Image (cartoon, rainbow, N blue to C red):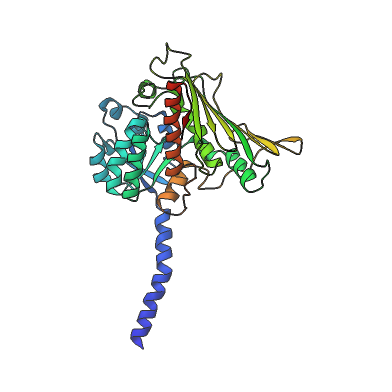
Amino acid sequence: MRIRKIFSTVVLLLLVGVPFLLSAQSQKPLRLAVAGVSHAHLHEVIVRMDRGDFEVVGVAEPDEQLRMNNPLRKKLDASLFYADLGEMLDKVKPEVVVVYGSIYDHLSVVEACAPRGIDVMVEEPLAVNMEHANRMADLARKNNIKLLTNYETTWYNTNYEAYRLIKQDDAIGKINRIEVYDGHEGPIEIGCGKEFTDWLTDPKLNGEGAVIDFGCYGLNLTAWLMNGEKPKSVYAVLKQFKPDKYPKVDDDATIILEYPSAVVQVMGSWNWPKGRKDMHIYGSKGYIYQDTPTSMRIYINRKEETVQPSPLKAPYNDSFYYLKAAVRNEIEIAPTDLSALENNLTVVQILDAAIKSAKSGKPVHL
């Protein structure tokens, strides 16, 4: 009888204790390391560091000048900075690595992290080309790590409201046309630092110019809205309107995607009069104009209405809340999700096709 009581007590403690331990673990800050410091989006880490949902446990940057002079130096102890990524990973043992170097460097970071079982989040797009993207995907799948891609537009209230209206409410009917506008006046024009523009305007380190930098946003959203369906063909025109500033790469891109039931036009440029990340979605019964992160226009029943949708709820309102929930397996990532590997493999495949199309002057069939 006594043994049975002891056994029952142990079982009860386990049943009560396991959820408690899991909850306690989820409350702990995410152990996060940074690979590279040359990307201007590094400020996304810095402005969140005092929030408490993650802690930066290490920073790897091979360039000594950048390693010694970057905004993280003011926030972290000097002992947390490493020249070698592998050494940093082995010493600090992070749960996840966020990447803020060139797009070309994404592959080498995954090559270091995947065999160690460390999840990775890169800034958009996933890779410079399909060769890199496929290698990264193979490593992620073989080693069972999460490989996420972060876009600013993933966290827009209006994009999610547009998706809900289309997928749940059938508000505008079947999609037949999407137009996506992304970009700004140009990275040099808006004052991006030299450490950023040096690789951003390099065809090897960035993969190309504006077509990569801003074309990826529209393709990411399109893959999401089209349920992961790939277009039949891709046609692109890449222009150099400012060869004096950007002599090695395009600074303006127009990508046209042909689907069986829709046409999509993605326009990414370093030549807009002002910064923009907006989208027009047309359906058989109306349209949705996603104008800003917080405001949109909806045309239904011959009437246009301006709407400010409700703010998104955590963890879907912030890249680092989302990252923590994903790494801790608190949320499920669908293949079509904006951050998902499968979605972003499609993005890189279309970017590859767009660059080939622009060079040949002909559509590329997928």
Tell which of 164 and 342 is nearer to you.
342
Tell which of 160 and 30 is nearer to you.
160
Q: Is residue 48 visible?
A: no
- The number of numbered badges drawn on the structure is 0
| Residue visible at 49% across and 41% down in the picture | 338
Q: Is residue 308 left or right of residue 153?
A: right
Q: Is residue 346 visible?
A: yes
Residue 39 x %, y %:
38, 29
Tell which of 33 and 55 is nearer to you.
33
Residue 164 x %, y %:
61, 45
Q: Residue furthest top?
A: 244
- Quadrant of the rendering where the N terminus is positioned: bottom left
Q: Is residue 118 left or right of residue 257?
A: left
Q: Is residue 178 above or below residue 142?
A: above
Residue 287 x %, y %:
67, 35
| Residue visible at 41% across and 60% down in the picture | 22
Q: Is residue 9 above or below residue 202?
A: below
